[in-house]
Image (cartoon, grey):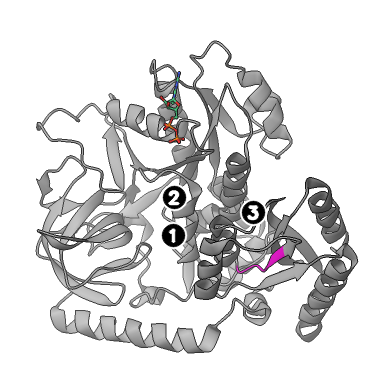
Amino acid sequence: EAITVQELANRMAEKGADLVKALFNMGMMVTVNQSIDADTAELLVEEFGHNLQRVSESDVDIDASVDVDPEETLQSRPPVVTIMGHVDHGKTSLLDALRGTDVVKGEAGGITQHIGAYQITTKDKQKLTFLDTPGHAAFTQMRARGANVTDIVVLVVAADDGIMPQTIEAIHHTKAAGVPMIVAITKSDKPEANPQKIRERLLEHEVIVEDMSGDVQDVEVSAKTGAGLDELIEKILLQAELMDLKARYDRDAEATVIEAKLDKGRGPVATVLVTRGTLKRGDTFVVGTESGRVRALVDDKGKQVKDAGPSVPVEVLGLGGVPQAGDVLTVVENEQRAREVAEYRQQQATAKRTATVAPNLEAMFAGLKSDVIEFPVVVKGDVQGSVEAINNALNNLSNDEIKVRILHSGVGAITESDVTLASASKAPIIGFNVRPNANARTQIERTKVELKYFDVIYHLTEEIAKEMAGELGPLR
Ligand code: GDP
Protein backbone atom coordinates (compact mmCIF):
# COMPACT_ATOMS: atom_id res chain seq x y z
CA GLU A 1 0.00 0.00 0.00
CA ALA A 2 1.58 3.24 -1.11
CA ILE A 3 0.34 6.79 -1.50
CA THR A 4 1.88 9.79 -3.15
CA VAL A 5 2.86 12.69 -0.93
CA GLN A 6 0.49 14.93 -2.87
CA GLU A 7 -2.45 12.62 -2.43
CA LEU A 8 -1.79 12.40 1.27
CA ALA A 9 -1.49 16.19 1.41
CA ASN A 10 -4.82 16.54 -0.38
CA ARG A 11 -6.51 14.21 2.02
CA MET A 12 -5.19 16.15 4.98
CA ALA A 13 -5.84 19.47 3.25
CA GLU A 14 -2.22 20.43 3.82
CA LYS A 15 0.23 21.79 1.33
CA GLY A 16 2.33 19.20 -0.48
CA ALA A 17 5.41 21.33 0.09
CA ASP A 18 4.87 21.24 3.85
CA LEU A 19 4.78 17.47 3.80
CA VAL A 20 7.96 17.36 1.76
CA LYS A 21 9.56 19.63 4.35
CA ALA A 22 8.39 17.42 7.20
CA LEU A 23 9.70 14.35 5.41
CA PHE A 24 13.00 16.10 4.87
CA ASN A 25 13.16 16.76 8.61
CA MET A 26 12.54 13.05 9.10
CA GLY A 27 15.54 12.37 6.89
CA MET A 28 13.71 11.54 3.67
CA MET A 29 14.26 13.25 0.36
CA VAL A 30 11.12 12.91 -1.71
CA THR A 31 9.08 15.06 -4.03
CA VAL A 32 5.32 15.53 -3.86
CA ASN A 33 4.73 13.06 -6.66
CA GLN A 34 6.71 10.25 -5.14
CA SER A 35 5.03 7.53 -3.17
CA ILE A 36 5.67 6.76 0.45
CA ASP A 37 4.74 3.62 2.31
CA ALA A 38 1.89 3.31 4.77
CA ASP A 39 4.09 3.53 7.85
CA THR A 40 5.71 6.75 6.72
CA ALA A 41 2.31 8.12 5.80
CA GLU A 42 1.08 7.32 9.25
CA LEU A 43 3.99 9.14 10.84
CA LEU A 44 3.26 12.17 8.72
CA VAL A 45 -0.41 12.13 9.55
CA GLU A 46 0.49 12.14 13.22
CA GLU A 47 3.06 14.83 12.71
CA PHE A 48 0.37 17.08 11.28
CA GLY A 49 -1.99 16.28 14.11
CA HIS A 50 -4.56 14.53 11.95
CA ASN A 51 -6.25 11.25 12.53
CA LEU A 52 -5.72 8.32 10.31
CA GLN A 53 -8.97 7.31 8.74
CA ARG A 54 -9.99 4.00 7.44
CA VAL A 55 -9.77 3.82 3.69
CA SER A 56 -13.02 2.90 2.07
CA GLU A 57 -13.34 -0.66 0.95
CA SER A 58 -16.08 0.11 -1.49
CA ASP A 59 -13.75 0.22 -4.40
CA VAL A 60 -11.77 -2.87 -5.15
CA ASP A 61 -8.83 -1.49 -6.96
CA ILE A 62 -7.39 -3.94 -9.38
CA ASP A 63 -3.84 -4.57 -8.27
CA ALA A 64 -4.00 -1.26 -6.48
CA SER A 65 -0.96 -2.01 -4.41
CA VAL A 66 1.38 -2.25 -7.36
CA ASP A 67 -0.47 0.17 -9.54
CA VAL A 68 1.10 3.45 -8.54
CA ASP A 69 2.15 5.56 -11.51
CA PRO A 70 5.85 6.37 -11.36
CA GLU A 71 6.57 10.03 -10.80
CA GLU A 72 8.22 10.61 -14.16
CA THR A 73 5.02 9.55 -15.95
CA LEU A 74 2.89 12.21 -14.26
CA GLN A 75 1.76 15.42 -15.90
CA SER A 76 -0.34 18.20 -14.54
CA ARG A 77 -4.10 17.90 -14.88
CA PRO A 78 -6.93 20.44 -14.64
CA PRO A 79 -8.56 21.00 -11.25
CA VAL A 80 -12.05 19.66 -10.61
CA VAL A 81 -14.26 22.24 -8.93
CA THR A 82 -17.62 22.00 -7.13
CA ILE A 83 -19.77 25.03 -6.36
CA MET A 84 -21.70 25.05 -3.09
CA GLY A 85 -23.79 27.52 -1.17
CA HIS A 86 -27.27 28.51 -0.04
CA VAL A 87 -30.25 28.22 -2.36
CA ASP A 88 -30.76 31.32 -4.54
CA HIS A 89 -27.30 32.65 -3.78
CA GLY A 90 -26.38 32.26 -7.43
CA LYS A 91 -24.72 28.86 -7.89
CA THR A 92 -26.45 28.03 -11.15
CA SER A 93 -25.95 31.54 -12.51
CA LEU A 94 -22.25 31.38 -11.64
CA LEU A 95 -21.88 27.99 -13.29
CA ASP A 96 -23.53 29.37 -16.43
CA ALA A 97 -21.40 32.51 -16.38
CA LEU A 98 -18.20 30.54 -15.95
CA ARG A 99 -19.19 28.27 -18.77
CA GLY A 100 -19.71 31.36 -20.89
CA THR A 101 -16.03 32.28 -20.50
CA ASP A 102 -14.95 29.14 -22.36
CA VAL A 103 -12.87 30.24 -25.35
CA VAL A 104 -13.57 27.08 -27.35
CA LYS A 105 -17.29 26.96 -26.71
CA GLY A 106 -18.48 28.13 -30.10
CA GLU A 107 -15.70 26.63 -32.15
CA ALA A 108 -17.27 23.43 -33.36
CA GLY A 109 -20.80 24.74 -33.31
CA GLY A 110 -21.54 22.40 -30.45
CA ILE A 111 -24.53 22.93 -28.23
CA THR A 112 -24.23 23.06 -24.47
CA GLN A 113 -25.05 19.66 -23.03
CA HIS A 114 -25.72 19.24 -19.37
CA ILE A 115 -23.94 16.00 -18.68
CA GLY A 116 -23.13 16.66 -15.01
CA ALA A 117 -19.81 18.40 -15.54
CA TYR A 118 -18.13 20.65 -18.07
CA GLN A 119 -14.67 21.85 -18.89
CA ILE A 120 -13.63 25.34 -19.90
CA THR A 121 -10.45 26.56 -21.55
CA THR A 122 -9.12 30.01 -20.65
CA LYS A 123 -7.44 32.52 -22.96
CA ASP A 124 -4.10 31.16 -21.74
CA LYS A 125 -5.11 27.63 -22.69
CA GLN A 126 -5.57 26.56 -19.10
CA LYS A 127 -8.34 24.11 -18.40
CA LEU A 128 -10.75 23.82 -15.48
CA THR A 129 -13.47 21.26 -14.85
CA PHE A 130 -16.67 22.15 -13.01
CA LEU A 131 -19.22 19.72 -11.67
CA ASP A 132 -22.48 21.29 -12.70
CA THR A 133 -24.72 19.76 -10.09
CA PRO A 134 -24.43 22.56 -7.58
CA GLY A 135 -24.98 22.02 -3.91
CA HIS A 136 -23.57 19.79 -1.28
CA ALA A 137 -25.95 16.85 -1.57
CA ALA A 138 -24.21 15.49 -4.68
CA PHE A 139 -20.80 16.27 -3.22
CA THR A 140 -21.46 14.44 0.03
CA GLN A 141 -23.22 11.52 -1.60
CA MET A 142 -20.19 10.93 -3.79
CA ARG A 143 -17.93 11.16 -0.78
CA ALA A 144 -20.11 8.74 1.13
CA ARG A 145 -19.38 6.29 -1.65
CA GLY A 146 -15.66 6.86 -1.32
CA ALA A 147 -15.33 9.03 -4.41
CA ASN A 148 -13.45 12.23 -3.79
CA VAL A 149 -13.41 13.77 -7.21
CA THR A 150 -13.53 17.40 -6.10
CA ASP A 151 -10.19 19.15 -5.76
CA ILE A 152 -11.50 22.60 -4.86
CA VAL A 153 -14.81 23.93 -3.53
CA VAL A 154 -16.10 27.37 -4.47
CA LEU A 155 -18.38 28.56 -1.68
CA VAL A 156 -20.96 30.98 -2.99
CA VAL A 157 -22.37 33.64 -0.64
CA ALA A 158 -24.71 36.36 -1.94
CA ALA A 159 -23.40 39.83 -1.09
CA ASP A 160 -26.92 41.11 -0.50
CA ASP A 161 -27.83 38.32 1.86
CA GLY A 162 -25.51 36.66 4.31
CA ILE A 163 -24.46 33.40 5.86
CA MET A 164 -27.47 31.11 5.65
CA PRO A 165 -28.11 27.56 6.91
CA GLN A 166 -26.97 25.90 3.68
CA THR A 167 -23.89 28.13 3.60
CA ILE A 168 -22.97 26.73 6.99
CA GLU A 169 -23.72 23.19 5.89
CA ALA A 170 -21.54 23.66 2.83
CA ILE A 171 -18.69 24.91 5.02
CA HIS A 172 -19.04 21.87 7.26
CA HIS A 173 -19.19 19.44 4.35
CA THR A 174 -16.12 20.99 2.77
CA LYS A 175 -14.17 20.92 6.00
CA ALA A 176 -15.19 17.34 6.70
CA ALA A 177 -13.88 16.38 3.27
CA GLY A 178 -10.65 18.30 3.78
CA VAL A 179 -11.01 20.08 0.46
CA PRO A 180 -9.64 23.62 0.07
CA MET A 181 -12.23 26.36 -0.35
CA ILE A 182 -12.43 29.62 -2.27
CA VAL A 183 -15.18 32.07 -1.33
CA ALA A 184 -17.09 33.73 -4.18
CA ILE A 185 -19.15 36.67 -2.97
CA THR A 186 -21.86 36.77 -5.62
CA LYS A 187 -24.35 39.40 -6.78
CA SER A 188 -21.74 42.08 -6.13
CA ASP A 189 -23.46 44.23 -8.77
CA LYS A 190 -26.47 44.77 -6.53
CA PRO A 191 -26.69 48.20 -4.88
CA GLU A 192 -27.37 46.64 -1.49
CA ALA A 193 -24.33 44.36 -1.72
CA ASN A 194 -22.16 44.37 1.38
CA PRO A 195 -19.21 42.03 0.80
CA GLN A 196 -17.32 43.22 3.86
CA LYS A 197 -20.16 42.07 6.08
CA ILE A 198 -19.92 38.61 4.49
CA ARG A 199 -16.19 38.43 5.20
CA GLU A 200 -16.81 39.33 8.82
CA ARG A 201 -19.66 36.89 9.23
CA LEU A 202 -17.55 34.09 7.78
CA LEU A 203 -15.16 34.52 10.71
CA GLU A 204 -17.84 33.14 12.99
CA HIS A 205 -17.66 29.92 11.03
CA GLU A 206 -13.89 29.76 11.03
CA VAL A 207 -13.58 30.70 7.42
CA ILE A 208 -10.94 33.42 7.47
CA VAL A 209 -10.43 35.09 4.12
CA GLU A 210 -7.20 36.80 3.09
CA ASP A 211 -8.61 40.26 3.79
CA MET A 212 -9.10 39.17 7.36
CA SER A 213 -5.52 37.89 7.42
CA GLY A 214 -6.57 34.28 6.88
CA ASP A 215 -5.57 32.01 4.04
CA VAL A 216 -8.88 31.40 2.30
CA GLN A 217 -9.00 33.20 -1.03
CA ASP A 218 -12.08 35.26 -1.73
CA VAL A 219 -13.37 37.18 -4.72
CA GLU A 220 -16.35 39.40 -5.47
CA VAL A 221 -18.22 38.30 -8.57
CA SER A 222 -21.33 39.05 -10.53
CA ALA A 223 -22.88 36.48 -12.80
CA LYS A 224 -24.93 39.32 -14.26
CA THR A 225 -22.13 41.67 -15.34
CA GLY A 226 -19.33 39.12 -15.50
CA ALA A 227 -17.27 41.12 -13.01
CA GLY A 228 -14.73 39.08 -11.08
CA LEU A 229 -15.09 35.91 -13.15
CA ASP A 230 -11.55 36.08 -14.51
CA GLU A 231 -10.23 36.71 -11.04
CA LEU A 232 -12.16 33.73 -9.69
CA ILE A 233 -10.71 31.52 -12.41
CA GLU A 234 -7.23 32.83 -11.63
CA LYS A 235 -7.66 32.03 -7.97
CA ILE A 236 -8.86 28.52 -8.70
CA LEU A 237 -5.85 27.97 -10.93
CA LEU A 238 -3.54 29.37 -8.26
CA GLN A 239 -4.99 27.00 -5.69
CA ALA A 240 -4.63 24.15 -8.16
CA GLU A 241 -1.00 25.04 -8.71
CA LEU A 242 -0.36 24.92 -4.98
CA MET A 243 -1.87 21.46 -4.92
CA ASP A 244 0.31 20.37 -7.83
CA LEU A 245 -2.44 18.18 -9.30
CA LYS A 246 -1.00 15.51 -11.55
CA ALA A 247 -1.95 12.29 -13.28
CA ARG A 248 -0.55 9.90 -15.81
CA TYR A 249 -2.10 10.29 -19.25
CA ASP A 250 -0.69 7.35 -21.23
CA ARG A 251 -2.21 4.36 -19.50
CA ASP A 252 -5.51 2.51 -19.31
CA ALA A 253 -8.11 4.80 -17.86
CA GLU A 254 -9.71 4.96 -14.47
CA ALA A 255 -12.71 7.21 -14.05
CA THR A 256 -15.45 8.03 -11.56
CA VAL A 257 -19.14 8.04 -12.42
CA ILE A 258 -20.77 11.41 -11.77
CA GLU A 259 -24.21 10.68 -13.20
CA ALA A 260 -25.84 7.72 -14.85
CA LYS A 261 -29.20 7.10 -16.44
CA LEU A 262 -31.09 4.89 -18.80
CA ASP A 263 -31.55 6.86 -21.99
CA LYS A 264 -34.47 5.86 -24.20
CA GLY A 265 -32.56 5.96 -27.43
CA ARG A 266 -29.03 5.30 -26.30
CA GLY A 267 -29.38 2.76 -23.51
CA PRO A 268 -27.42 3.06 -20.26
CA VAL A 269 -25.34 6.24 -20.27
CA ALA A 270 -22.86 7.36 -17.63
CA THR A 271 -21.02 10.62 -17.31
CA VAL A 272 -17.59 9.92 -15.95
CA LEU A 273 -14.68 12.04 -14.90
CA VAL A 274 -11.36 10.48 -15.85
CA THR A 275 -9.05 10.33 -12.85
CA ARG A 276 -6.02 8.92 -14.64
CA GLY A 277 -5.11 7.50 -18.01
CA THR A 278 -6.98 8.10 -21.25
CA LEU A 279 -10.35 6.55 -21.96
CA LYS A 280 -10.74 5.55 -25.60
CA ARG A 281 -13.44 4.36 -27.91
CA GLY A 282 -13.33 0.56 -28.03
CA ASP A 283 -11.93 0.15 -24.49
CA THR A 284 -13.28 -2.74 -22.44
CA PHE A 285 -14.12 -1.78 -18.90
CA VAL A 286 -15.74 -2.58 -15.58
CA VAL A 287 -17.82 0.05 -13.85
CA GLY A 288 -19.03 -0.81 -10.37
CA THR A 289 -20.34 -4.30 -10.92
CA GLU A 290 -21.23 -3.78 -14.57
CA SER A 291 -19.00 -4.35 -17.53
CA GLY A 292 -19.02 -2.93 -21.03
CA ARG A 293 -17.15 -1.66 -24.04
CA VAL A 294 -16.92 2.03 -25.00
CA ARG A 295 -19.15 2.43 -28.03
CA ALA A 296 -18.99 6.21 -28.07
CA LEU A 297 -17.73 9.10 -25.99
CA VAL A 298 -19.67 12.36 -26.03
CA ASP A 299 -18.28 15.55 -24.52
CA ASP A 300 -20.02 18.47 -22.79
CA LYS A 301 -20.54 20.19 -26.11
CA GLY A 302 -22.46 17.24 -27.49
CA LYS A 303 -19.56 16.27 -29.71
CA GLN A 304 -18.33 12.73 -30.21
CA VAL A 305 -14.71 12.42 -29.18
CA LYS A 306 -12.19 9.61 -29.64
CA ASP A 307 -10.72 9.80 -26.19
CA ALA A 308 -10.76 11.62 -22.84
CA GLY A 309 -7.81 12.25 -20.51
CA PRO A 310 -7.52 13.14 -16.81
CA SER A 311 -10.13 15.56 -15.39
CA VAL A 312 -12.13 15.42 -18.63
CA PRO A 313 -15.85 14.73 -18.21
CA VAL A 314 -17.47 12.57 -20.91
CA GLU A 315 -20.57 10.55 -21.46
CA VAL A 316 -19.83 6.90 -22.01
CA LEU A 317 -22.08 4.73 -24.18
CA GLY A 318 -21.82 0.98 -24.31
CA LEU A 319 -22.50 -0.02 -20.71
CA GLY A 320 -24.09 -3.32 -19.75
CA GLY A 321 -26.27 -1.64 -17.14
CA VAL A 322 -26.73 1.61 -15.26
CA PRO A 323 -24.00 2.18 -12.67
CA GLN A 324 -24.28 4.43 -9.62
CA ALA A 325 -22.76 7.84 -9.05
CA GLY A 326 -19.45 7.30 -7.31
CA ASP A 327 -18.74 3.97 -9.00
CA VAL A 328 -15.28 3.54 -10.42
CA LEU A 329 -14.77 2.70 -14.06
CA THR A 330 -11.62 0.73 -14.79
CA VAL A 331 -10.37 -0.23 -18.22
CA VAL A 332 -9.22 -3.84 -18.41
CA GLU A 333 -7.47 -5.87 -21.10
CA ASN A 334 -10.36 -8.02 -22.27
CA GLU A 335 -13.94 -9.07 -21.66
CA GLN A 336 -12.93 -12.15 -19.75
CA ARG A 337 -11.05 -10.00 -17.27
CA ALA A 338 -13.95 -7.55 -17.15
CA ARG A 339 -16.32 -10.33 -16.15
CA GLU A 340 -13.91 -11.58 -13.50
CA VAL A 341 -13.51 -8.18 -11.95
CA ALA A 342 -17.24 -7.45 -12.07
CA GLU A 343 -17.92 -10.75 -10.37
CA TYR A 344 -15.26 -10.11 -7.77
CA ARG A 345 -16.69 -6.70 -7.02
CA GLN A 346 -20.15 -8.21 -6.72
CA GLN A 347 -18.93 -10.74 -4.19
CA GLN A 348 -17.12 -8.04 -2.27
CA ALA A 349 -20.25 -5.92 -2.22
CA THR A 350 -22.34 -8.79 -0.87
CA ALA A 351 -19.72 -9.70 1.70
CA LYS A 352 -19.54 -6.11 2.78
CA ARG A 353 -23.30 -5.80 3.12
CA THR A 354 -23.42 -8.76 5.43
CA ALA A 355 -20.29 -7.93 7.36
CA THR A 356 -20.52 -4.25 8.00
CA VAL A 357 -24.06 -3.09 8.56
CA ALA A 358 -23.93 0.07 10.62
CA PRO A 359 -20.99 2.39 10.55
CA ASN A 360 -20.30 0.96 13.96
CA LEU A 361 -17.77 2.45 16.22
CA GLU A 362 -15.60 -0.61 16.22
CA ALA A 363 -15.08 -0.42 12.49
CA MET A 364 -14.63 3.27 12.71
CA PHE A 365 -11.81 3.00 15.16
CA ALA A 366 -10.19 -0.03 13.64
CA GLY A 367 -8.03 2.12 11.46
CA LEU A 368 -7.37 4.94 13.85
CA LYS A 369 -3.84 4.82 15.06
CA SER A 370 -2.81 8.33 15.90
CA ASP A 371 -2.74 9.50 19.47
CA VAL A 372 -5.91 11.53 19.60
CA ILE A 373 -8.94 9.63 18.43
CA GLU A 374 -11.71 11.64 16.87
CA PHE A 375 -15.33 10.99 17.69
CA PRO A 376 -17.36 12.58 14.92
CA VAL A 377 -21.01 13.49 15.48
CA VAL A 378 -23.79 15.40 13.80
CA VAL A 379 -26.03 17.33 16.19
CA LYS A 380 -29.59 18.51 15.51
CA GLY A 381 -31.79 20.18 18.12
CA ASP A 382 -35.10 21.99 18.48
CA VAL A 383 -33.81 25.39 19.53
CA GLN A 384 -30.57 27.31 19.12
CA GLY A 385 -30.01 27.50 22.87
CA SER A 386 -30.03 23.77 23.39
CA VAL A 387 -27.85 23.13 20.33
CA GLU A 388 -25.24 25.50 21.72
CA ALA A 389 -25.44 23.92 25.13
CA ILE A 390 -25.01 20.46 23.60
CA ASN A 391 -22.04 21.56 21.53
CA ASN A 392 -20.36 22.98 24.60
CA ALA A 393 -21.10 19.91 26.66
CA LEU A 394 -19.76 17.61 23.92
CA ASN A 395 -16.61 19.63 23.51
CA ASN A 396 -16.04 19.33 27.24
CA LEU A 397 -15.99 15.54 26.90
CA SER A 398 -12.83 15.73 24.81
CA ASN A 399 -9.58 14.78 26.46
CA ASP A 400 -6.01 13.95 25.42
CA GLU A 401 -7.00 10.61 24.01
CA ILE A 402 -10.30 11.23 22.35
CA LYS A 403 -11.84 14.33 20.93
CA VAL A 404 -15.43 15.03 19.90
CA ARG A 405 -15.61 16.43 16.42
CA ILE A 406 -18.91 18.13 15.62
CA LEU A 407 -19.19 17.81 11.85
CA HIS A 408 -22.34 19.83 11.73
CA SER A 409 -24.90 21.14 14.16
CA GLY A 410 -28.11 22.99 13.60
CA VAL A 411 -31.70 23.64 14.50
CA GLY A 412 -34.54 21.65 12.97
CA ALA A 413 -35.50 18.17 11.90
CA ILE A 414 -32.87 15.66 10.83
CA THR A 415 -32.61 15.99 7.06
CA GLU A 416 -31.19 13.95 4.20
CA SER A 417 -28.21 16.22 4.13
CA ASP A 418 -27.45 15.41 7.78
CA VAL A 419 -27.65 11.71 7.00
CA THR A 420 -25.32 11.90 4.01
CA LEU A 421 -22.81 13.88 6.02
CA ALA A 422 -22.97 11.45 8.94
CA SER A 423 -22.72 8.46 6.66
CA ALA A 424 -19.77 9.90 4.75
CA SER A 425 -17.87 10.37 7.99
CA LYS A 426 -19.24 7.30 9.72
CA ALA A 427 -20.64 9.44 12.51
CA PRO A 428 -23.76 9.00 14.60
CA ILE A 429 -26.51 11.63 14.51
CA ILE A 430 -27.66 13.08 17.79
CA GLY A 431 -31.23 14.35 17.79
CA PHE A 432 -32.31 16.54 20.68
CA ASN A 433 -36.10 16.84 20.72
CA VAL A 434 -36.10 16.43 16.95
CA ARG A 435 -36.81 13.54 14.57
CA PRO A 436 -35.83 12.80 11.00
CA ASN A 437 -38.13 13.92 8.21
CA ALA A 438 -39.54 11.34 5.79
CA ASN A 439 -36.73 11.49 3.24
CA ALA A 440 -34.13 11.30 5.95
CA ARG A 441 -35.84 8.25 7.44
CA THR A 442 -35.60 6.32 4.18
CA GLN A 443 -32.00 7.26 3.88
CA ILE A 444 -31.22 6.26 7.45
CA GLU A 445 -32.60 2.83 6.72
CA ARG A 446 -30.47 2.53 3.65
CA THR A 447 -27.23 3.87 5.08
CA LYS A 448 -27.70 2.39 8.55
CA VAL A 449 -26.47 5.57 10.13
CA GLU A 450 -26.70 5.43 13.89
CA LEU A 451 -29.35 7.68 15.37
CA LYS A 452 -29.56 8.72 19.01
CA TYR A 453 -32.45 10.66 20.50
CA PHE A 454 -32.35 12.61 23.74
CA ASP A 455 -34.51 15.08 25.58
CA VAL A 456 -32.23 15.72 28.53
CA ILE A 457 -28.75 17.09 27.91
CA TYR A 458 -27.33 15.28 30.87
CA HIS A 459 -28.45 11.93 29.46
CA LEU A 460 -26.89 12.83 26.17
CA THR A 461 -23.47 13.63 27.59
CA GLU A 462 -23.58 10.60 29.86
CA GLU A 463 -24.31 8.28 26.95
CA ILE A 464 -21.71 9.78 24.62
CA ALA A 465 -19.09 9.82 27.37
CA LYS A 466 -19.78 6.14 27.95
CA GLU A 467 -19.37 5.34 24.27
CA MET A 468 -16.19 7.31 24.07
CA ALA A 469 -14.73 5.52 27.07
CA GLY A 470 -15.84 2.18 25.70
CA GLU A 471 -14.13 2.81 22.44
CA LEU A 472 -10.92 3.83 24.11
CA GLY A 473 -10.78 0.76 26.31
CA PRO A 474 -9.94 -2.12 24.00
CA LEU A 475 -7.48 0.01 22.07
CA ARG A 476 -5.16 0.76 24.93
P1 GDP B 1 -28.92 28.99 -6.95
O1 GDP B 1 -30.19 28.56 -6.31
O2 GDP B 1 -27.83 29.15 -5.92
O3 GDP B 1 -28.48 28.13 -8.09
O4 GDP B 1 -29.18 30.48 -7.49
P2 GDP B 1 -29.50 30.99 -8.97
O5 GDP B 1 -28.28 30.96 -9.80
O6 GDP B 1 -30.70 30.27 -9.47
O7 GDP B 1 -29.83 32.52 -8.69
C1 GDP B 1 -30.89 32.93 -7.87
C2 GDP B 1 -31.37 34.31 -8.28
O8 GDP B 1 -30.36 35.28 -8.12
C3 GDP B 1 -31.78 34.39 -9.74
O9 GDP B 1 -32.94 35.17 -9.85
C4 GDP B 1 -30.62 35.05 -10.42
O10 GDP B 1 -30.99 35.78 -11.56
C5 GDP B 1 -30.10 35.95 -9.34
N1 GDP B 1 -28.65 36.16 -9.47
C6 GDP B 1 -27.69 35.20 -9.50
N2 GDP B 1 -26.47 35.75 -9.63
C7 GDP B 1 -26.65 37.09 -9.69
C8 GDP B 1 -25.75 38.20 -9.82
O11 GDP B 1 -24.51 38.07 -9.89
N3 GDP B 1 -26.31 39.45 -9.83
C9 GDP B 1 -27.66 39.64 -9.72
N4 GDP B 1 -28.10 40.89 -9.72
N5 GDP B 1 -28.51 38.61 -9.59
C10 GDP B 1 -28.04 37.35 -9.59
Label of residue 150 in the image:
2
Residue 368 vs 19, above or below: the answer is: below
- The secondary element bearing badge 1 is classed as helix
Seen from the viewer's position, the closer of residues 432 and 284 is 432
Three-letter code, disc 1 = Met
Q: Which one is earlier in the sequence, the residue at label 3 or at label 2?
A: 3
Label of residue 22 in the image:
3
Q: Tell whether label 2 touches label 1 (CB within 8 Å).
A: yes
Seen from the viewer's position, the closer of residues 260 and 39 is 260
Q: Which residue is mark 1?
A: 142
Can residue 14 be seen in this snapshot? no
Three-letter code, disc 2 = Thr
Q: Quadrant of residue 94?
A: top left
- The secondary element bearing badge 2 is classed as loop
Q: Position of residue 18 (x, y in %)?
A: 61, 47
Q: Position of residue 150 (x, y in %)?
A: 44, 50
State which region is magenta: 426-430
Q: Quadrant of residue 48?
A: bottom right
Q: Alpha-carbon neighbours of circle 1 within 10 Å: few (<14), some, or many (≥20)?
A: many
The residue under the point 62% across, 17% down is: 194
